[in-house]
Amino acid sequence: MRSAVVIVASVLCAALLCSSARADDDPYALLLAPAGTCGPADAQLGLDEQTAQLTMLCLTNYARQHAGLSPLSLNATLTTAGAAKLHADVSCGVFSHEPCGQPFDTVFAPYTAGASAFQIGENIAWGTGSFGTPRSIMDAWLNSTGHRENILTPNFKELGIGYLSNQAFQGTVGAVLWSQQFGTRTATPAPAATPKPVVKKKPHKRRGLRLRHR
């Protein structure tokens, strides 16, 4: 039987619902990369997928490293999982870890397949205007207990980042949706090769063999 640990968290960060906290009253301000540390894209909207993913990866690893943790590596399978979750949210018009009644871990199936043990987690968020930028989303996650715990879980080794920009979502236009898919896994060891039997050959006994030459 495989062992698994699943951690989930969610946050709704829309206009009028969340804002960046100031450093003087934010106990987690030191975990948020200063503006521009991860490039100018951290405060921009309408990013292409690669730029969005690399910027959010940078913000995530800044927080982990300043908490004394190892950085995460970007995993394509987890990124695909994150995109699938966000597309399902938009398609079903819900902000949920289980959109359309789909079990939370369904999108993780390709990642956990063949693993003898795994641990997965997920953060999701959406915002409009300046609340949808990478830095604003990370600020909201860091100031939410469950999301911060996912970001700072020592056991996680890999990260996938889902990103959808300029969406019509739950009665708003221009919504930006984000997801973080966290994971670590242990591959099932390959079965040990069966040793081949050792066969001892019986030497041929030479009988009356003579050689001649002329």
Image (spheres, rainbow, N blue to C red):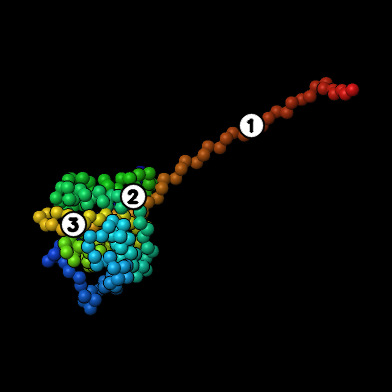
Q: Is residue 121 visible?
A: no
- Among the 4 quarters of the image, the one containing residue 129: bottom left
Residue occupying image coordinates x 74% and y 26%: 204
Query: From mark 2 to mark 3, how far is it between C-alphas?
Result: 24 Å
Residue drawn 20% across the image and 62% down it: 132
Between 109 and 62, the residue placed more toward the observer is 62
Mark 2 or mark 3: whose residue is earlier in sequence: 2
Residue under numbered circle 1: 199
According to the picture, the residue beneath numbered tag 2 turns out to be: 77
Between 199 and 175, the one lying in front of the other is 175
Give the percent coordinates (x, y) of residue 136.
22, 66
Q: Locate residue 59, reporting x and y percent.
A: 30, 65
Q: Nearer the viewer, mark 2 or mark 3?
A: 3
Q: Mark 1: give few (<14), some (14-19) or many (20+) Cα within 10 Å.
A: few
Q: What percent of the width, then of the height, locates residue 56?
A: 29, 62
Pointers 1 and 3 in contact (CB under 8 A)? no
Q: Residues within 10 Å of mark 3 (few under 14, many from 20)?
A: some
Compared to 123, does 190 lie above or below?
above
Asked whether, in this view, residue 115 is left or right of residue 19, the answer is: right
